[in-house]
Image: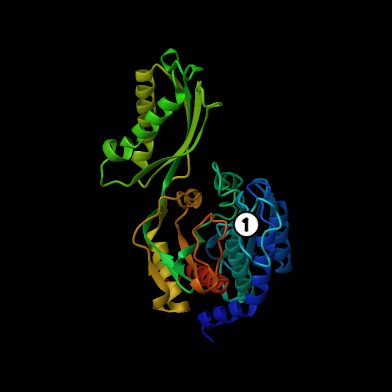
Amino acid sequence: MEIEEKIKSLSKKFFPSLVKLRRELHQYPEIGYTEYKTSDIIARELKKLGLKFKKGVAKTGVVALLNTNKKGKTMALRADLDALPITELTNLPFKSKNLGRMHACGHDVHMTCVIGAAKILSSLKNELTGKVKFIFQPSEEFFPGGALPMIKAGVLKNPDVDGIFGLHCDSSIKAGKIGVKDGPIMAHIIDFNIIIKGKGGHAARPQEGVDAVVVSSAVIQALQTIPSRRISSLKPVVVSVGVIEGGAARNVICDKVVLKGTARTLDGNIAKKIPVLLKEIISGVCKSFGAGYELEYDRGYPVLVNDPKMTDLVRSSAKKLLGKGTIHEIKDPVMGGEDFAYYLKRVPGSFINLGTRNEMIGAVYPWHHPKWKVDEKSIEIGSALLAQVAFDFLNDKY
C-alpha cells in the first residue's frame, strides 16, 4: 500500500476520536497564558502515544518529539492553544462551558489536527526517518504572543528544526479544500494607544477649554491620510481606531480621550515608517488645537512570509493525498496578523489555510465571530495533510 493510502486510512480510523478531542477542547477554552486545562489535555493525548514531551514551556506551552532513531532531518508542526474573550452564541451541544471564552478562531481544530498528525506519524514511525517536533504554543491571539517566548525557550533547537508547518482554519474556503500561497500571506501589525490631553470646562463656554473629544475626532480623521496620502497607493496599508474612551457628562468639556487602534501593512519598510507618521500627525493636530498627547505603540507580529519551496511541498503533498482539485490558490494576502511569522523568520516553512466552510451547517462566519463553526470533516483532512507533509519533508519526497 502506498504511503498516501496508509495516511488516509489512518486519518479515517482516528477521525472519531479526533472529533471527540476537538469537542472537549472546544468546551474548555482558555485565553493566553491561562491554558492550563488545555495543555493538560494535550499532554494526556501525547502520553497515550508514548511520545517524549515537556509541559510548561513558555508557561503553558507543550512540546513533544517523535524520534525515529534514524538519521535525518527534523521538522516541526505547530498549533496554538488559546481562545478568545468572546461569549459563544452557537447552539452546539458542546459549546463553551467557560463564560466569556470561546474557540472562535479554530485553535481547537488546529490542536486536534496536530494531535491527529502525531497519531498517524507514530503509527508510521518505521517508515519515517529523522524527527518530528509537535509544538503547542500559548497566546497567539494577543501581542506579544507566545511564539517568541517559545523560540527563546528553545523549541527550534535540540534538535535543530529544518522546516516548520502550521495550519489555520479558513471559513472562506470550502471544507475539503486547502489554501496555499507563496510569499507574504498575513500582515505586519502595529498596535497603538493615544491619549489626547485637553482642558476641561463647561460645555456652554467651550472657548475656555480644549475639547479633547474634538481634538480626537480630528486626529482620527488625519490618521487616514497615512494610507491615502503618505504611503504609495500601490502598497496596502490599513489604519483603524477601534476604541474611543472619554467624557463624563453631556455638559462638560472633556479633558482626556483615549484612542486605541491598529495599523497593518505587508511591507516591513513601511512598518518602520508608521510609528514616525503617527507621531508626526498626532503632534501636528494636537498643536493646532493647543492640546497635548501621549503615544504608545507596539511593533507587533511581522509579515508572515511563506517559503516558496516549502509551499510547493504542501502543494505536492496535497495533490498526492487529496487530489489536485482540493488545492485552492490564495490570490491575495489578508491584513490580519499571526505570530507563526516569527518561526518563519528563522526556519523555512509554510502556513496552510484549512477550508472549514459548509453552508448547510452554518459554518460560514468569519474568525472571531461568536457564531463561529467548522465542518469537522476538515479535521480528517488537516490531520492527514500535516502527516503527509511531514513524511514528504523527512523522506525528501519533493
Dot 1: element: loop
Vertical position of residue 51 compared to residue 257: above or below: below
User: Which residue is under mark 1?
Assistant: 88
Res 69 → quadrant:
bottom right
Please identify the quadrant where the C terminus is shown.
bottom left
Residue farthest toward the bottom in the current orientation of the protein: 1
Q: Position of residue 371 (x, y in %)?
A: 56, 60
The residue under the point 58% across, 47% down is 146
Camera-side residue: 48 or 304? 304
Categorize mark 1 by other alpha carbons within 10 Å: few (<14), some (14-19), many (20+): many
Q: Is residue 132 left or right of residue 290?
A: right
Q: Position of residue 171 (x, y in %)?
A: 48, 64
Vertical position of residue 253 compared to residue 97: above or below: above
Q: Position of residue 74 (x, y in %)?
A: 54, 61
Vertical position of residue 134 compared to residue 375: above or below: above
The residue under the point 40% across, 58% down is 307
